[in-house]
Image: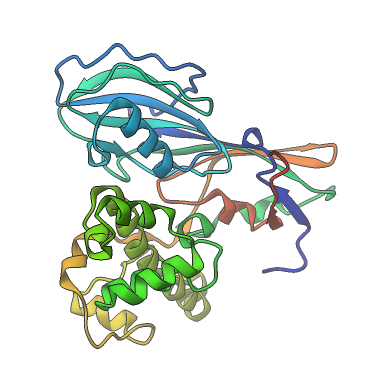
Amino acid sequence: MNNDLPEGIYKTTPESFVVQEIVGSDPPRAVSFCDESLIRGWEGDPYTIFVLSKRRWSTEDAMKEVARQLHVGFDDISVQGLKDKQAKTSQHLGVRGNFRDAFSHPDISLVQLYGQEVPLRPGDHYGNRFDISVISDADQINLAAAKSAPNIFGPQRLGRQEGSENVGRLFLEGKPEEAIELMLTTMGAKGLTQAMQEAGGSWKGALSHPSFRFSYRFEIQKWQSYLWNKLLLEQIDKLGPAVPDLLPMWNPRNQKVLEMYRHLWNPSQLETDVFKFLIKKDRPTMVRPKDFKANKKTGSWNFTFDLPPSAYASVILSQLFRLKERHIYA
């Protein structure tokens, strides 16, 4: 953290941190918000695409609520990316097969769009559009610092609880009992507890239960993300501006990549069944926001910009402020 930066408080209300998924390519467009749900019913397509708008709900929990009300399985729901919980967000959501034609929720809206042949896949969207207000007394900030930043995974991926990234490591090392214990002690693991109940109280059954598979994958990828952040920061310290454009995610099936990460993590055993959840794409080392605009207001700053998939607005804003998240709503 750069202590010379001014303090900035963000995510005070959902309306102060607005995220719209950008979809399509000719031209790309931001997904509009919907205030009321509108569902016509299943029209026979393999997959039906909706607009999902939400406030103060994580994408995973919103997906579970959609599955519950539409009477479909959690595995029947697909999205292209996870959006912030402490925010107002809009994105596309896919539902496989037939579904109940009714949905009602005070903080989540669902509007039916069209049918298609395939599910939504993570990272297939164009990016995300942000409209963010940061409370700060700073009259001037170095806006040039936000034009390019290390593309590290932010706290939305890694969590704010110290040590929670080790859950994925323990799963990969074939130590599920230790992973579950760590989840329960550091994160609460509401989803795991629910999955255990639905699996008859068995943690083994919970790990393979559809309602927990999403979280299971997320924890595996969190450990990958933690390692990638470490590798990137080392490369920046060593190479400076000459850092390569892309760095691979940890991949046990690529010996060259394993050697790159060996000094960071060198497990004596690995659970191969978990490999299917790993991210396999290389990741850009730097992120450059598009259409970046800043507007000074009394006691705050407003920022609008676009980012590619899996890039974090908090990383951009942390180039300008010592960020602190504070929620002032009930």
Residue 181: where, in percent of width, then height?
A: 40, 72
Above or below residue 258? Residue 184 is: above
Q: Give the position of the C terminus as an image quadrant.
A: top right
Residue 104: where, in percent of width, then height?
A: 44, 21
Res. 215 image quadrant: bottom left
Instruction: Please state the total of marks drawn on the protein image.
Output: 0
Extreme front residue here?
200
Residue 318: where, in percent of width, then height?
A: 64, 57
Tell which of 57 and 312 is nearer to you.
Answer: 57
Residue 99 in view (yes/no) = yes
Tell which of 224 and 13 is nearer to you.
Answer: 13
Res. 160 image quadrant: bottom right
Residue 280 in view (yes/no) = no
Above or below residue 96? Residue 80 is: below
Above or below residue 323? Residue 72 is: above
Residue at x 39%, y 21% (from the top left corner)? 103
Tell which of 8 and 93 is nearer to you.
Answer: 93
Res. 319 image quadrant: bottom right
Extreme top residue here?
40
The chosen color scheme is rainbow
Residue at x 27%, y 78% (from the top left corner)? 173
Residue at x 67%, y 69% (from the top left corner)? 1
